[in-house]
Image (cartoon, rainbow, N blue to C red):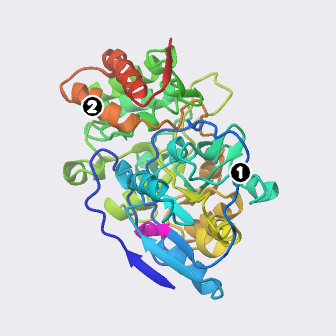
Amino acid sequence: MTVKFRAIGAPGPGRPRRRAGLLALGALLALGAAACGTSSGKANTPSTGGSFKTAAQTGGTLTVWVDSDRLAAAKLYQKAHPEVKMDIVTYDGDANGSNYLQTKVSLFNRTSSGWPDVVFSSQNNETSWAVQAGFAAPLNKGLIPQATLDGWATDANAPCTVDGTVYCLRNDLSQTVLWYNDKLMKQWGYQVPTTWEQYQALGEKVAAEHPGYLVGAAGDTFAPEIYLWAGKCGANQITGPKAVTVDATSAACTKMATLMDTLIKDKTLSTSSVFSSDFDKNEADKILMMPGPSWYGGALFQGTFKTPAGQLGVAPMPQWSGDSSPSVGNVGGGTWLVSAHSKNLKASTDFVTWVTTSDDYQGKLAPGFPAYTAAAKTWLAAQQSSGYYADDITAPLTAAANQVWAGWGYGQFSQEAVWAATVTPGVNAGKTIVSLLPAWQDSIVNHAKADGYQVATK
């Protein structure tokens, strides 16, 4: 086995989802694998057309590209499969939308050589270019059995699927839930809200009775993926290859934005980034509740905020009253791709199957919530047995894994970059999110058109 470390340079700004941390057995595994995909729902990729023609299958060394967090997975596979000759290369994993993989594949396509057999990406939207570039192999066309593919959480492989063909496998999920301070909730006699109406009312009550305490945070670029995505705001509906419908001023968007504005005005919804030193110093110990992805538990509360054991609880994401179809957002989750140019497809597909489904890695060592359902059960059991949480985390996280709203698309353009450029500055200047929705819509439209999308608006 050969392991190479490739210097990529510092990741660019704007997509700070990946916060990694592995803790010892018996402690919480922190989720740094909340990898940053650019939105979610349906894959935004053109169909390749025609049939898949494999390269001559000569076997040989299996070349695998991983980020530093997945290096342990590749090494564990090599240990379990000593008969497989491997060349393991570490790269940035396309963190923060670096586009390193796309750039290299473009070069390899020009020289007709150099493609790795398997690649991990921290992005959910790699198929938006990888299929058109002829890089991603169609996994459900004889490479991986459908019975195996059926083991993923509902719509987990949506960002990998184009016209019914699966071109990658989801590594982990970042479904949103409601984190809360169980000790304070009981001490103050509050009930964990089950509806957004109750959530807002409790936020207003906290503002009056316990000023300074928070029920959430909206200062990060992924704030819309926590609140607006969960609220079924159709700002990013991918309707087909290079087609998107943008409706950022709909009733659903306005309703959630109004809730956020109300709590921002009451100062119970922070406008600071949860990863900022200011938040860590002044607000981290003032959290009563906080909607956020599955990786908040380990990476944020235990890892960054050092929240004591026995205080942190997790509940289902609130839903609007009368809505019988629960929906949550998603903030990350990486993917594995097999190269269509691989001369060792058998070993490549065996590796990606193992690395995404094996209890030895996903269930016992993976930093994030596994997208593969059986492995997720093992992973959750390890978290629960750590004794860190105040209550059962299994039921809410498992339910949320199958409730990510499919109306938010995995486009090539970055929703987080759009939000950061149009909404964040306005909020920091004292404007309401509701008043900024038209500008948000215009910016989404412009970014989508720049990436070659046909855009429909409502």
Q: Is residue 164 above or below residue 302?
A: above
Pointer 2 with pointer 1, Cβ within 8 A: no
Task: Magenta stretch: give its range.
Answer: 65-69
Type of residue at label 1?
Phe
| Kind of element beneath mark 1 | loop
At x 63%, y 83%, the residue is 84
Q: Is residue 401 above or below residue 232?
A: below
Mark 1, other Cα within 10 Å: few <14 / some 14–19 / many ≥20: few
366 or 353: which is nearer to us?
353
Q: Is residue 365 above or below residue 405?
A: below
Which comes before the other along the chain, label 2 or label 1? 1
Type of residue at label 2?
Ala
Residue 22 visible in rendering: no
Q: Position of residue 383 (x, y in %)?
A: 55, 66
At x 56%, y 25%, the residue is 320
- Residue under pointer 1: 52
Residue 290 visible in rendering: yes
| Kind of element beneath mark 2 | helix
At x 27%, y 50%, the residue is 12
Q: Position of residue 395 (x, y in %)?
A: 65, 52
- Residue under pointer 2: 421
